[in-house]
């Protein structure tokens, strides 16, 4: 499990391949700042929120696992040579880029599955042993915000992947 977290952190890089402190701040510091809203005591006092949270994260675990399996199917597609050196070189670069992005997506989705499973456990503990303290509310808000922001990152990367697949490269089209 810890290596998945490490691999996830390794995907948080800028275009130069260096660690992106902005991504770390958005995914880990921003949720902490937003979770400080728990000081305001706006989180519901009843345990129903934890029952709903258990359901939400359990469903997300299953859905994300299905997405991961679908992405594995895409990952299995092979690159084929056409015999044209220019087209082949361009296609090979696109293929390598796609493989890297798919690998990062797999890592990020694995991370989200772990977060979902841990969240189910945490919310189950909060449901069974309610303490109604600031820390309980803080952890709850942090988990939701962190999960949402990480999910948005996965959606963005998936969008980039699909846009690259859907884009038409005029040089790759043969003359008719």
Image (spheres, grey):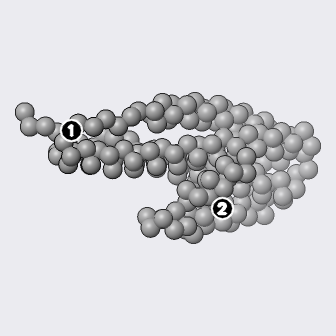
Distance between the alpha carbons at the discs numbered 1 and 2? 47 Å
Pointer 2 local density, CA inside 10 Å: few below 14, some 14–19, many at least 20 = some
Residue pictured at 62% horizontal, 58% vertical: 9
Q: Earlier in the sequence, mark 1 or mark 2?
A: 2
Q: Secondary structure at mark 1?
A: loop
Q: Position of residue 86 (x, y in %)?
A: 20, 48
Quarter holding residue 22: bottom right
Which residue is tagged 2?
28
Q: Is residue 99 left or right of residue 5?
A: left
Which residue in the structure is indicated by mark 1?
83
For the point 63% across and 42% down, the residue is 110
Q: Is residue 61 left or right of residue 159?
A: right
Mark number displayed over residue 2:
none
Q: Is residue 146 visible?
A: no
Q: Which residue appears at 13% of the width and 37% of the height?
A: 174
Q: Secondary structure at mark 2?
A: helix
């Amino acid at each position: 499990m810890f290596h998945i977290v490490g691999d996830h952190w390794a995907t948080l890089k800028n275009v130069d391949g260096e660690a992106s402190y902005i991504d770390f701040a958005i995914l880990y510091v921003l949720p902490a700042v937003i979770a400080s809203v728990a000081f305001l005591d706006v989180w519901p006092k009843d345990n129903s929120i934890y029952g709903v949270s258990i359901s939400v994260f359990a469903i997300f675990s299953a859905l994300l696992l299905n997405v991961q399996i679908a992405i594995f199917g895409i990952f299995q597609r092979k690159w084929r040579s056409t015999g044209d050196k220019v087209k082949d070189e361009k296609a090979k670069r696109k293929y390598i880029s796609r493989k890297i992005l798919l690998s990062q997506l797999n890592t990020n989705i694995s991370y989200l599955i772990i977060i979902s499973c841990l969240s189910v456990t945490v919310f189950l503990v909060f449901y069974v042993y309610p303490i109604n303290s600031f820390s309980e509310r803080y952890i709850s808000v942090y988990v939701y915000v962190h999960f949402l922001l990480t999910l948005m990152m996965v959606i963005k990367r998936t969008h980039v992947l699909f846009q690259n697949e859907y884009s038409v490269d005029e040089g790759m089209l043969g003359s008719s």
